[in-house]
Amino acid sequence: MRSEKFTFPGSEGQELAARLDLPEGAPKAYALFAHCFTCNKDIFSAQRIAAGLAARGIAVLRFDFTGLGHSDGEFANTNFSSNIQDLLAAADHLRQAYQAPKLLVGHSLGGAAVLAAAGDIPECEAVATIGAPSDPAHVAHNFTDKREEIEREGEAEVQLAGRPFRIKKQFLEDIAAQRLAERIAGLRRPLLIFHAPLDETVGIDNASGIFLAAKHPKSFVSLDDADHLLRRKQDAIYVAEVLAAWADRYLKTGEAETDARSQGRGGETLDAEGTVVVRETGEGFLSQHVVAGRHRLRADEPTSVGGDDTGPTPYDLLLAALGACTSMTMRMYAKRKNWPLQRAQVTLRHEKIHATDCADCETKEGRIDRIDRTIRLEGPLDDTQREKLLEIADKCPVHRTLHSEVRIVTQGEAVAADAGQSAARAFPEAP
C-alpha cells in the first residue's frame, strides 16, 4: 500500500489535513472515509479499514474535520452541518485531483455525516456506516451535565475521550435541526450498516433506526462483541474484508470489471504498448480521461475557453511528450558515454506565428506552429559534451515524429443509444 499526505481547503477555507491510501496498482475506485466525533483520520480503526480496502484495490481518502487532528480551524466553531460541508469539499478534491468517490464510509457521527452528504455527491454508488447514530442529536448525551451551562453561557468546556473540547450553543441547535431520517429515506444507494450489539457509546437501536428508514438494497452486519472504536485489530480487519466484498458488488470492482477495464470499445487491449484511449469524463464540459496502459491522466482546457481547468491542455500534453522524450534521450546518451550529466531540464512553449515571420520555413502563407525549447544541463560537462547533447536532443523520437510526415487514420464507431451505458463501462475510470 502507498500513502500520500496533503492538505485541501475545507468548507470555510481552512486547510484540512488528509491522507490518501492507495493500492499498489491503479485504483479500481475511490472511497471517502469520515471519522468519529472528536476523533481524527489516524485513529486505529480508520487506518486498518483504509489499509484493508487499499489491499483490495480501493483507494481511500481520510481527513481531519475542521479543528481536529492536524487540520486548521477551531472545533468550537464547527457543527454537524460544517462537517457535511467538509465532506463535500473532500469529495470535490478527489473529483478534481483523482476521481470522485464512489464509496462513502463513516464511523460513528461520521457515519451520520456520510448519510447526510451522499445525496450531494452524484458519483457516490454505495454507502457504509459503522456504529453510526440514527440522529446526530445523539451525541448530546456526551455533555448532558454541561447542557444547562451551554444554554446559559452560550458555550462550555466538556471532557470527551479524556480531552477538553469547547461546545457552543450553536452546535446543539444545529444537531437538533437535522432531519437525517429524511436523508436516509431518500438515499437511493445501496447501504451497509455495521453495528455492535454491545456498543455502549451508540446503542444498537440506532442501527435499527437507520435500517428501517432506508430503502432496499440495505444490509446489516453485526459486529458481535466489538467496542465502538473497533480497538481490536481483528474487528477492524473484519469490517474491511466484509466492506470490500460488499463494495465489489456495487462498485463493479470484481473480475468482470477488471476484464472490462483492460479493453476499449473496439476490443483493443488498453495495456498494450502504444495504445491510448481518451473519453469524456462527464464531469465537465471539456474534461477528458486519458488512459495509457496502466496509467491514468486527465486533460482539460482553462476556464477562459470554456473548460474547468482540471488537467493540462492537449498542447500541454504535447509539449510534455516532447520535453520528456528530449530529456530521456539525452540521459540515455550521457549514460552510454559515461558523461557527468547530473540533471536535465527542458522548458517548452507553444505558439502560433505568421509564416512570414519564419525565414527558414517552407510554408510562406498563413500561420504555423512554433515550439520554443530551452534545455538546461547540470553537471561538470565540457563544451564539447554540452554541444553534443544538444545535438542529440533533436534526435529524440517525438522530435523526429513532429518533423516527419504523419498520417492520422480515423475510423468511426456507431453505438446504439441503449448500449451507451454498458459500452461506457468498458472504459477504465481514471483520476
Image: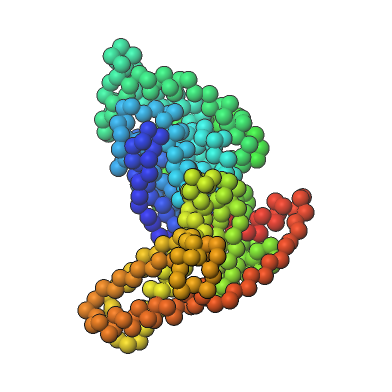
Relative to 93, is 200 above or below?
A: above
On the image, the x and y values in percent for residue 105 come to: 49, 43
Q: Residue at x 61, y 30 (%)?
A: 185
Q: Residue at x 59, y 70 (%)?
A: 275
Residue 310 vs residue 58, the one in the foreground: 310
Q: Quadrant of the N terminus?
A: bottom left
Residue 128 vs residue 294, the one in the foreground: 294
On the image, the x and y values in percent for residue 297 come to: 50, 59
Q: How many marks?
A: 0
Q: Which coloring applies here? A: rainbow
Relative to 176, is 370 above or below?
A: below
Q: Is residue 122 left or right of residue 95?
A: right
Residue ranking furthest to the left: 380
Residue 162 lies in what quarter of the image?
top left
Residue 181 vs residue 20, the one in the foreground: 20
Relative to 183, is 97 above or below?
A: below
Residue ranking furthest to the bottom: 337
Relative to 254, is 38 above or below?
A: above
Q: Is residue 329 left or right of residue 116?
A: left
Q: Residue at x 35, y 68 (%)?
A: 374
Q: Is residue 33 visible?
A: no
Residue 232 vs residue 219, the one in the foreground: 219
Q: Residue at x 33, y 21 (%)?
A: 168
Residue 14 lies in what quarter of the image?
top left
Q: Is residue 167 left or right of residue 202?
A: left
On the image, the x and y values in percent for residue 72 come to: 30, 38
Q: Is residue 86 visible?
A: yes
